[in-house]
Image (cartoon, grey):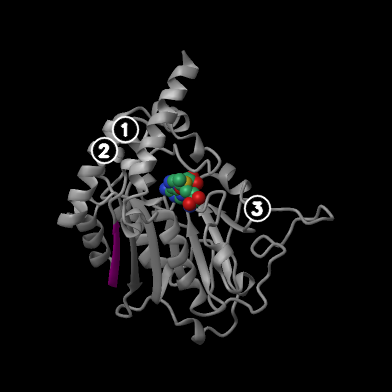
Amino acid sequence: MMSLLARFIAANQRLSKTAEDRLPARFKRHIQTLYKYKAAELVNRRPGQVVLDIGGGKECPFLPYLDAPHAHLIIALDLSEEELRRNRQLEGKIVADAASHGFPVRDGSADLVLSRSVVEHIRDNGAFFANCARVLRPGGFMIHAFPGKYAPFALINKLLPNRLARRLVANLHPEWREEDNYGFLAFYDRCYFSAVRDLLDSNGFENLRFDFLYYQSIYFNFFFPLYLLMLAYDLIASVLGVRNLASGIVVTAERSWINRVAPRPSELSSPEVATAPVVRDRDSNGAAADPIFGRHRPAKPPPARLHAK
Ligand SMILES: C[S@@+](CC[C@H](N)C(=O)[O-])C[C@H]1O[C@@H](n2cnc3c(N)ncnc32)[C@H](O)[C@@H]1O
């Protein structure tokens, strides 16, 4: 019975793939890929940046695309200590809730704040973007990639119990299991264009740039007729440019220079970095590695300060 179902799904996925192959490349752009390149481009702009990877989890996706990864201080901040422990790419790690009032990062200390597939998991994005504004130096940038609240797959995800949604994705899309980057509880708080734009405006961000993606029918490729129906929906939303219906959003924004909360990095006299990472790796002798830099101390000291409160 199971193998019959598996064969049925595989046949439907093959048919869906045939249709997908005929779609324009731009329409099929993958949010994860777009994010990796855009995030790397921001980090590569200049050396010695303090970069906060919010909800960094077990993977820093843009790291392989950096010209000089060790020239920056990249810190993953995540609610889950377990996820951070699995992160072998970064050694600066902070366990914290990115939307909490006690966000343990000093005002104006980060050059870049970024996140991938995290905004939809945050309960209160008003508090989250206020924290981003506070910790970014004036003129600092942020980039976030997240799914749109009103995309059909997101609406279904929100309706289903989290465990069931996780099992469905694992069974219907075994090819995504390897990434193991799905199934976290999602709230989609104000995860759509106009709400995010308003949140960023009210928190003093400017030069907002949005990329909108509409192709989410891939979630439904297990049943070809449903895939076609969803594809029609995606194409119509895309052609009409209904931005609040986008299934994926990548937004970049600059922290305003007005209401400066901290000195520019070049004005800081003795660059130092101190915070309270809960996750500490060990070096080859078993000694605790430097809690911030680990074995990857940047060639140049980073330009700004980070402090636990
Ligand atoms: C889907 S994973 C994405 C992980 C990583 N950014 C990536 O792209 O592979 C979502 C991550 O966000 C973290 N997260 C969820 N809510 C958070 C919050 N309020 N503050 C910090 N991290 C949070 C989760 O623990 C998880 O590691």
Which residue is disc 2 drawn over? 228
Say which element carries label 3.
loop
Given contact means CB atoms under 8 Å apart, are the residues at marks 2 and 1 in contact? yes
Which disc is residue 88 wearing? 3
Disc 1 marks a residue whose amino acid type is Phe
Tally the numbered discs.
3
Which disc is residue 224 wearing? 1
Cα–Cα gap, marks 2 and 1: 6 Å
Is any atom of residue 47 visible in this view?
yes
Give the residues drawn in magenta, as a range: 204-212
> Which residue is depicted at the point 49% across and 18% down?
3
Disc 3 marks a residue whose amino acid type is Arg
> Which residue is depicted at the point 56% across and 44% down?
83
Q: Residues within 10 Å of mark 3 (few under 14, many from 20)?
A: few
> Which residue is depicted at the point 61% across and 69% down?
69
* Left or right of residue 132, residue 289 in this image: right
Cα–Cα gap, marks 3 and 1: 39 Å
Frontmost residue, 116 versus 25: 25
Indicate which disc, 3 or 1, sits on the residue closer to the N terminus.
3
Horizontal and vertical percent position of residue 161: 36, 27
Cα–Cα gap, marks 3 and 2: 40 Å
Is any atom of residue 205 visible in this view?
no
Horizontal and vertical percent position of residue 133: 36, 66
Horizontal and vertical percent position of residue 61: 52, 57
Say which element carries label 2.
helix
Residue 109 is inside the magenta segment: no
Residue 209 is inside the magenta segment: yes
Ligand 1 within 8 Å, label 2 CB: no
Ligand 1 within 8 Å, label 3 CB: no
Disc 2 marks a residue whose amino acid type is Leu
Frontmost residue, 149 versus 152: 152
